[in-house]
Image: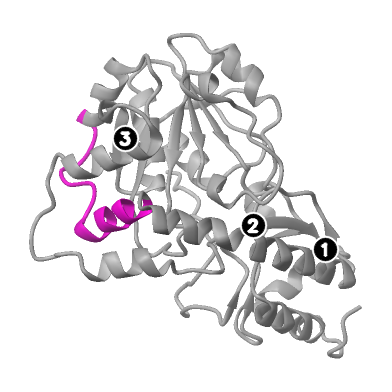
Amino acid sequence: MSFPTPAAHGGPDALGAPAHDFSTNANALGPCPMALLAIARADASRYPDPASTRLKAALADFHGVAPERLLLLASASEGIQRFSAWAARTAGACVWLPPHHYGDLSRAAGAWGLVRTDDPGRARLLWACEPSSPLGQAEAGLAERVVGLRPDQALVLDQAYAPLRLSGAPSLDGAALDRVWRLVSPNKALGLTGVRGAYAIAPLAARQAMAELEALAPSWPLGAHAEAMLMAWTAPDTQRWLGDGLDTLREWKAAQAALCESLGWTVLPSEANYFVARLSEASDIESLPGLRRDHGVKLRDAASFGLPGQVRLGVRSPEDQAALRAAWPRARGGDNSAR
């Protein structure tokens, strides 16, 4: 009997939260004060509206779509499981995944018996993420895959990092976006990853699929705190806070890339608030656990993304970067000076 591979995630673990955590892609300027206040004021003593009437109306107005196109999800990860379960209802269904992707996509495909295919034309379900995970880049060939979609295919575009795009431009325009499912999970952009809650915007011609996906939902997928976070997400002052912080993140990213290069690492191109770096020596990957607690710094080993010998780093503050500069030589058994 085979068992699923344990999920690989960044962030806190059984030993608690690292003091200087580069292993997640959450907005380093968070938490967003307006969203945090909304969550604190949420009434957790009562069930939320099971139909989420006010929330759907607010999200629909925010995105300029009909409320009927909003599919509420307990989290992006729950959405991945639900879309996979939905696709598996079709006998012999295949799934197409990007070459490098979030591990939950493979886990969900395996859990629901979806066969992976390298041919997008054969897939019932296709996944994309832009900026991509873990590289933070444009998805190669995404526009072409959308043009080639048949009515019996569904492409889900994970837009978790779109609000944290620091350069470049999206591959899809408005008309193309109306042909795909857009998966939105604002907690990363708000610096509130501990609050779970997400939603998907359905394509224009997806009424039957929407009904089937709604039927797969648990009762009350959103708790009071998730609902408060998503309502706050649509507020103008929240969006101003997010936009005002992007220049700071760009400055921090440039400094962090320069730091990594000074350590002898090769920084790969990225359009988001994170990037992948190739370590200078294969043996350097063995030094990562030493950063986790001994020096309070944690990086994300990118091997689970299919990138061995590389790490993914969320953009962090100058103070966090100084901690990385000091910790890396010690973790490798050297002195405190950066190479």
Cα distance, mark 1 to mark 2? 19 Å
**Residue drawn at the location 82% of the way across and 63% of the way down:** 279
Residue 206 shows up from this direction: yes
Callouts 3 and 2 close, C-beta under 8 Å: no
Q: Is residue 248 left or right of residue 263?
A: left
- Look at mark 1 in the image and give the residue it sits on: 279
How much space separates mark 3 and mark 2, taking CA atoms? 27 Å
Q: Earlier in the sequence, mark 1 or mark 2?
A: 2
What residue occupies the far bottom of the structure in this picture? Answer: 335
Image location of residue 71, percent across then percent down: 30, 34
The mark closer to the camera, 1 or 2, is 2
Q: Nearer the viewer, residue 81 or 24?
A: 24
Q: How is the image coloured?
A: one colour
Can residue 313 be seen here? The reply is: no
Mark 3 and mark 2 lie on one chain; the one further toward the N terminus is: 3
Identify the amino acid type marked 3.
Answer: Ala
Say which of marks 3 and 2 sits in front: 3
Q: What residue type is labelled 1?
A: Leu
Q: Distance of mark 1 from mark 3, alpha carbons?
A: 44 Å
* Residue bearing the label numbered 2: 273
Residue 89, above or below 337? above
Q: Which residue is drawn at 32% across and 57% down?
A: 229
Which range of residues does the magenta coloring cover? 215-233
- Rendering coords of residue 50 (x, y %): 13, 43
Displayed quadrant of residue 274: bottom right
Which quarter of the rendering shows the N terminus?
A: top left
Secondary structure beneath disc 3?
Answer: helix
Circle 1 residues within 10 Å: few <14, some 14–19, many ≥20: many
Placement of 110 over or under 146, stated as above or below:
below
Residue pointed to by mark 3: 60
